[in-house]
Amino acid sequence: MGDDVPPDHPRHDSLVTRERVVDGVERGITSRAGLVAQGRGEAFDYLLGEQTVESAARAERAAAALLLRADHPVVSVNGNVAALVPEAVGGLARAAGADVEVNLFHRTEARVERIAAHLRANGVEEVKGLTAEARIPGLDHERAKVDADGIAAADVVLVPLEDGDRAAALAATGTEEIVVDLNPLSRSARAATVPVVDNVVRAVPAMAAHARALADRPPADLDDIVARFDADAARADAERAIRSGEL
Ligand code: ATP
């Protein structure tokens, strides 16, 4: 996987990431629609210089603080995230004291089981999302399924690469969302308390590192980090970087 991409290739990281998503599809972890989402993300990432811009780095720190301050934080995992960052999801969940829940747009029980097994093989001890007996109000039956003691009971949810309808429906329940999405204009990014305009392959490890670094800070410090984060300014900064190409 990724072995055929020469290390000095200018698109090395992007091509390795793409191969991981293709591998996820071949293993029945990622849906074919996940390939389209990845391609869309690649275009935005290219324009961002395939790097974490300053405003995204601040968002990642604020996201870690918000997760640490939550009573019941959950990291939501779809097929792309499972293929791209399974170990980092576990690292972030441990550092932030968060649950991990498989939550799929194109849900099939077989795919949920395969993703759960893949996460466990990559060090995630407990995986939720298999029972999915609760529903997010305002969505059709299949797309609304969540665990009653997972996302349905969460006060903060990290939803990397979420569909706009579902992000808006979850936000409408009063749940705070951290959204990782390379498109700063997406409805998901606009529904988020903390939008992180960065590639999940960089964002999730960065949030885990911030969560470890902030773990011993007093609650007031964490609240201050969250309060000083300006979601509109962060999205506007990412949009400016993408449109201007001035990196
Ligand atoms: P919305 O409804 O929120 O406007 P959408 O439903 O059109 O968005 P999708 O087609 O589901 O969005 O695409 C998923 C989103 O995830 C895209 O905005 C894409 O830029 C983003 N994305 C894809 N791959 C990555 C990645 N590796 N890291 C971060 N974001 C990504």
Image: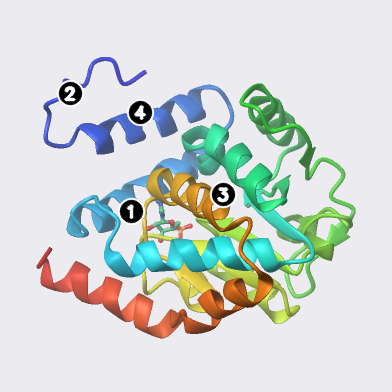
Q: Are marks 3 and 4 in contact (CB under 8 Å)?
A: no
Q: Amino acid at mark 3?
A: Arg
Closer to the chain start, of discs 1 and 4, is: 4
Residue at 71% x, 73% y is 175
Q: Amino acid at mark 4?
A: Glu
> Residue 229: horizontal and vertical position, in percent?
46, 79
Cβ at disc 1 under 8 Å from ligand 1: yes
Q: Disc number at residue 204?
A: none
Q: Which residue is mark 3?
A: 212
Closer to the chain start, of discs 4 and 2, is: 2
Q: Which residue is mark 2?
A: 7
| Mark closer to the observer (4, 2) | 2
Cβ at disc 3 under 8 Å from ligand 1: no
> Residue 196: horizontal and vertical position, in percent?
43, 64
Q: Secondary structure at mark 4?
A: helix
**Location of residue 17 with respect to 201 vertically, above or below:** above
Q: Amino acid at mark 1?
A: Arg
Closer to the chain start, of discs 1 and 2, is: 2
Q: Are marks 3 and 1 in contact (CB under 8 Å)?
A: no
Q: Which residue is mark 1?
A: 40
Q: Amino acid at mark 2?
A: Pro
